[in-house]
Image: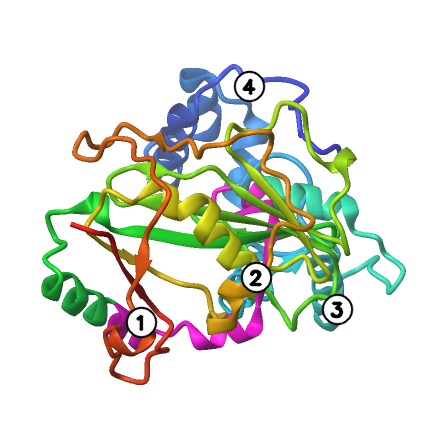
Amino acid sequence: MPRTYVRKREPNYSIDDLKTALNLIRKKKMTVDVASTQYHNPRQTLYARLSGSRGGGKPGGVTILSHEEEKFLIHVVHKYQEWQQPLTRSDLISIARTFMLELGKKNITNESSLHEWFYCFHRRWGSEIKLVETYKFEKIRSISCTKIVVDRWFDHLKQVLSKLNLFNRPEAIFNIDESAFGDDPGRKQVIIKRDSKYATCTHGGSGKRYTTLLICTSASGKFLPPYIIYRAQRLFDAWLPDNAYPGARFNATPSGWSEETIFYDWLCKQFVPAVELIRKLLIPSPTTELDPSTSQINTNANIDDNVLKTVKVSRLHRSSSCPNLVSNDLSLIPKNDRLSTNNNLDTNSSIIVSAPS
């Protein structure tokens, strides 16, 4: 059967007329010959519909699996997605082949490719499933990020914002996060629900090479230039683009991840000059805690400033309450003066930064 069935000849009668003629014949109010003449229905069609030999379903060939059997496969696809192990094209074909063999479907063997079947199956159920590329998600993060943890974090955030009177000062709240871009070509197409936006696939962790991007934005819409970290022993000039984002800073670590000295360099060279005029700041920190000796380490090696002396602060135009800020000094509150955290939250969940009045 072709992928898209095209009827060879269209009938010259309507379905409504056919149904009316059949009802009159079954009620013995009209004979087949009279109904055929009055409603322009072929007599062979009327006899076939009355006997039930054909004409009850959709035109075209019969599918290997029935509607209910295919609906069961859709349920399997949804379940695998809930388990964060979405099925690939070959996975679903393998499951469907085993299912067909167990049901005793004709002309199906262990060597059947079923590629054409999958194409037609995807077309028939396009309102329920779709093919997208996966986003890898480490299993430890999937297990740790529970509803209780998220609720406790927001409760703690509310306490901190209330204590520091920051609810009406979005320009004083900064968020810093890092994203790693790997060279792992393991992203693949999987089958998920039609109404799902992302296909998340958990894995045990990857040893692939990563390039890390450190980004900081404020609640008022300001964002600092990116801080890019390569995986290498040293930074090469060939890696630095000529048309890089203004103020972007580059560095390198053996792992390609953000480390203690990297974060301290970002804090001193990018963040501090941008926020000196703000009296109080709240900024989530990475998991690495700064050692007091870090401030004595020379972090100038293997660092490129993109030939810029100052830090450019860009704006998303969501608020006009915070002008661009440039300065050179900012004092940190000692660690023992930081706010304590409750509910078993990590004590590194926030750093309170204070600038001179």
- Marks 4/3: CA distance? 40 Å
Count neighbours of disc 4 (C-alpha within 10 A) and say few if under 14, some if 14 to 19, many if 20 or more: few
Question: The residue under label 2 is which amino acid type?
Answer: Thr
Count neighbours of disc 2 (C-alpha within 10 A) and say few if under 14, some if 14 to 19, many if 20 or more: some
Residue 133 part of the magenta-drawn span: yes
Asked whether residue 24 appears in the rendered view, the answer is yes
Instruction: Report the quarter where the N terminus lies.
Output: top right
Asked whether residue 53 appears in the rendered view, the answer is no
Task: Tell me the SS state at disc 3.
Answer: helix
- Marks 4/1: CA distance? 85 Å
Q: Give residue 156's position: percent from left, percent from top.
A: 22, 71
> Which stretch did the figure color magenta?
124-153
Task: Tell me the SS state at disc 1.
Answer: loop
Question: The residue under label 3 is which amino acid type?
Answer: Thr
Mark drawn on residue 261:
2
Residue ID for mark 4: 11
When asked about the image quadrant of residue 108, the answer is bottom right
Q: What residue do we see at 64% from left, 48% from top?
A: 251
Q: What residue do we see at 72% from left, 61% from top?
A: 91
Question: The residue under label 1 is which amino acid type?
Answer: Pro
Residue ID for mark 3: 98
Residues at circles 2 and 1 in contact by the CB criterion of under 8 Å = no
Decide: is 163 above or below 209: below
- Marks 1/3: CA distance? 64 Å
Residue ID for mark 1: 334
